Amino acid sequence: DVTGVQTCALPIFRAVHEIEEGVILSSCNRTEILLAPRNGLGPEDAAGRIRDFLCAVRQVDPAELDRHLYVHHGPAAAS
């Protein structure tokens, strides 16, 4: 059930991966994750944790995901 996965993914992600605030927006052809890490987790570390989370939850090979993953942080993320 896709709805069930989407409903439970954010609380699990926040609890396990040191995320203070976050939004997962998923459409038919892409997923966007916006977050504010807690405990001073830097943007590169946060991006790596998101990648690991997505690979584990969706059972995707990291090399496959890396071909489609991009990261924006700071002011560039808002434009």
Image (cartoon, rainbow, N blue to C red):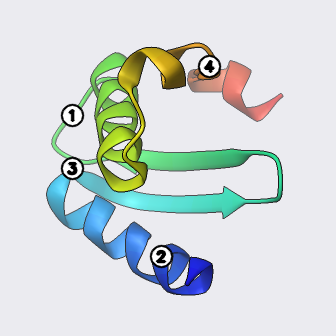
Where does label 3 land, which residue? 17
Is disc 4 surrounded by few (<14), some (14 to 19) or many (20+) residues within 10 Å?
Answer: few
Decide: is 26 above or below 4. above
In this rendered view, identify the residue nearer to me: 52 or 11: 52
Left or right: 22 in relation to 48: right
Badge 1 marks a residue whose secondary structure is loop
| Eye-nearest disc, 2 or 4 | 2
Left or right: 1 in relation to 28: left
Q: Quadrant of residue 74?
A: top right
- The kind of residue on which mark 4 rests is Tyr
Where does label 4 land, which residue? 70
Q: Work out whether mark 2 precedes mark 4 in sequence or the reverse, and give the earlier one.
A: 2
Q: Work out whether mark 1 precedes mark 4 in sequence or the reverse, and give the earlier one.
A: 1
Distance from the alpha carbon under mark 2 to that under mark 3: 17 Å
Residue contact at pointers 2 and 1, CB within 8 angstroms: no
Rendering coords of residue 23 (x, y %):
56, 61
| Eye-nearest disc, 2 or 1 | 2
Badge 4 marks a residue whose secondary structure is loop
Distance from the alpha carbon under mark 2 to that under mark 4: 23 Å
Left or right: 19 in relation to 66: left
Is disc 1 surrounded by few (<14), some (14 to 19) or many (20+) residues within 10 Å?
Answer: few
